[in-house]
Image (spheres, grey):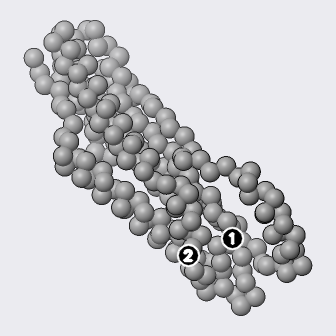
Amino acid sequence: MIKTQRRIRIRDFKRVLSLLLTAIVSIAFIPTPLFSAEYQYSYPIHGTTVQELMEQIKQQSHSPDGAFGYTELKTHVGWTAIVEPDGKCTVETVDFSYDISIYMPDWVNKHSAKQCLQDNWDTVWYEIQIHEEQHRNLYRLLDVNDINQRIMAIKPRSSCNDLELAINSEIEKILDANDKLHDYFHAANAPATIWDC
């Protein structure tokens, strides 16, 4: 999911020199985090059989397809632009960041079930937690500095609406390439499943 914020101003040539000097002084103090934050959440489920647990997971999961575990990426894109004297819109500053969240189930009444199902659950939960952490590691490959530079390199557009479309398109290309890594990972690593006992 891409969240975009933009601020546009008309270039004031009387302020250019002052702005440049300010930028030179302040740029060393601008933080460049690898990402915004990482989170881990749990969602409660109840049941004493595999069928009950799977139905609860399907209903309560944060995954679009009701998966056991889910790793979510949220991107945040802030940028400013300058409208040049010729009317073209140019990227001035970019602030791209992202958050990674892992969602896993919390079996509330676990000790009411058969011991063999509890043991099976513990094994599967651990394996899927590791699986989701691998997804998180793949998301960490998104280099914030590189993405900011790629957006800054976008050529001026005839309007700021066109520039916004170009920025979103560039980000989509980057995210699509990262998505392919997740597809390859899934193809080679099927997540564990709970079985009855």
Q: Where is residue 2 in the image (x, y as percent from the top left)?
A: 50, 58
Q: Where is residue 179 in the image (x, y as percent from the top left)?
A: 34, 56
Q: In this view, does 3 lie above or below 105?
A: below
Q: Residue 103 got which mark?
A: none
**Residue displayed at 52% across by 75% down:** 166
Q: Which amino acid does label 1 sit on?
A: Glu
State whether residue 104 appears in this view. Answer: yes
**Residue displayed at 18% across by 46% down:** 188
State whether residue 60 appears in this view. Answer: no
**Residue displayed at 71% across by 71% down:** 8
Is 6 displayed left or right of 36 in the figure? right
- For label 2, the crowd category at 10 Å Cα-Cα, with few meaning under 14, some 14 to 19 and many 20 or more, is some
Q: Which of 25 and 67 is in front in this view?
A: 25
Q: Which of 117 and 192 is in front in this view?
A: 192
Q: Residue 92 got which mark?
A: 1
The C terminus - image quarter = top left
Q: Nearer the viewer, residue 141 or 156?
A: 141
Is 63 displayed left or right of 118 in the figure? right
Q: Position of residue 61 (x, y in %)?
A: 34, 36
**Residue displayed at 73% across by 84% down:** 84
Q: In this view, does 7 lie above or below 188?
A: below
Total tally of numbered discs in the picture: 2
Q: Which of 77 and 18 is in front in this view?
A: 18
Q: In this view, does 12 lie above or below 44?
A: below
Is 162 displayed left or right of 104 in the figure? right
Which residue bears the numbered disc 2? 154
- For label 1, the crowd category at 10 Å Cα-Cα, with few meaning under 14, some 14 to 19 and many 20 or more, is some
The local secondary structure at tag 2 comes to loop
Is 63 displayed left or right of 155 in the figure? left
Q: Position of residue 140 (x, y in %)?
A: 44, 47
